[in-house]
Amino acid sequence: MITICNNSHSDFILLGFSDKPYLEKILFWVILIFYGLTIAGNMVIILVSLKDPKLHIPMYFFLSNLSLLDLCFTSSCVPQMLVNFWSPEKTISYIGCAFQLYVFLWLGATECVLLMVMAVDRCVAVCHPLQYTTVMHPKLCLQLAILAWGTGLFQSLIQSPATLQLPFCSLQRVDDIVCEVPALIQASSADTTYNEIQMSVASIILLVVPLIVILSSYGAIAKVVLRIKSTTGQKKAFGTCASHLLVLSLFYGTVTAVYLQPKNHYAHEWGKFLTLFYTVVTPTLNPLIYTLRNKEVKGALMRLGRKTWDSQSNSRG
C-alpha cells in the first residue's frame, strides 16, 4: 500500500481518544466545567489585581500576567477540544491547526519564562527585603513581562513554520488532542531529525534553563528562611512561596513529561492525559491555589465584594 504525502493545506484529524468514545463523552463535561472555572477564576484574579491598590506590587502584577496567559492559553485549544470530543468527525482546518500551534507554542514558552521571573521576584523579596522596592521597580517589572511574552513569541515564530512545512500524509491524522509540535512531527512522513533537534534545543532553553534558575532562587530563599529564628516568621516566608512552588510543580512536571518523553506508544498515550492536564487542569487550579493560600488576595476579594455591594445598595437607595 502506497501512502501519499504532500504539503497540501487540507484539514487535519485530531484522533484524541477516538478509540475510547465513552471516555470522550465524560471528558467533554469535565473539561467544560474546568474551562468555566478557568475563565471565572482568572478573570477574578485580573480584576482584583487591577482594582485593589494594595495589590499594585510586582508579585500581583506578574500574577495577573499569568492569569491573562492562562485565559488565552486555554481558549486557544479547549473550544476545539470540546467540539472534537462531542463530534465523531474530529477535524480541524489547516488554518485552525496552524493558529493553534502558533498560539500554543507562544503562550507555553511565555509561561516558562514568566514562572522563572516570578521565582526571581520572590527571591529578591525574601533575600533582599530592604532593597526590594528599589530593585523590582515598575519599569523593570514591565520589561521582564515584555521579555517573557516576547521570548515566547520569538520561539513560536521560529518553531511553528518549521513544523508546518513538514509534508503530511493525505489523511493528515494527528494522534493527539491538540496541534502541538511532538504530535505533528510524529504525523509527518519526512525525515524530522532537524525538527527534533530544534525541539530539543528549545526544550533545554525554555524548560531546563528556567528550571535551574527557579531551583537556584528557591534554594537561596530556603537558606534565608532557615536563618529566621522565629517559627512564625519561617511559616510566613514559606507560605508566601508555597503557592508558586505548587504552580511550578504542576506546570513543569506535565510539560517536561510531554516534550521529553520516550518515543513509544505507551508514553504517547499517557502524553495525551498530560497535555490535557497542563491545558485544562493547571489553568483552573492556578487562581484557586493563589486565592485559597493567600490572605492578601482573599482580603482584596472581600473588599471588592463589599465595595460592589455598597455601590449596588446606594444605587437602589
Image (spheres, rainbow, N blue to C red):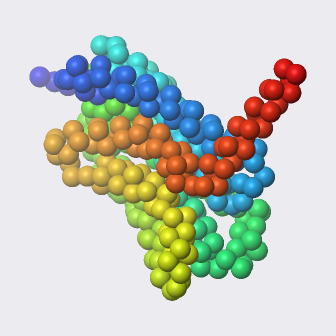
Q: In the image as oriented, which residue stretches furthest toward the left? A: 1
At 63% across and 72% down in the image, what residue appears? 125
Q: Residue at the location (34% across, 50% down)?
A: 254
In the figure, 89 relative to 244: above or below? above
Q: How many marks?
A: 0
Query: Which residue sits furthest top?
Result: 88
> x and y percent of residue 136 in the render?
71, 69
Where 305 sits versus 151, above or below?
above
**Front residue of this view, candidates 45 and 90:** 45
Q: Is residue 96 left or right of residue 66?
A: left
Query: Residue 228: x and y, percent?
Result: 53, 83
Picture quarter with the C terminus: top right
Observer-nearest residue: 166 or 285?
A: 285
The residue under the point 68% across, 54% down is 61
In the rendered view, does 270 fall on the left or right side of 179? Answer: left
Q: Quadrant of the N terminus?
A: top left
Residue 265 percent location from the top left of the image: 16, 41
Residue at image location 55% in from the left, 69% down from the top: 236
Along the line of sight, the residue nearer the viewer: 225 or 248: 225
Q: Is residue 293 visible?
A: yes
Mark yes or no: residue 158 visible: no
- Give the side of residue 103 with respect to residue 311, left or right: left
Quadrant hosting residue 11: top left
142 to 300, vertically: above or below: below
Q: Position of residue 70 (x, y in %)?
A: 53, 41
Q: Is residue 296 above or below residue 231?
A: above
Q: Is residue 23 left or right of residue 98?
A: left
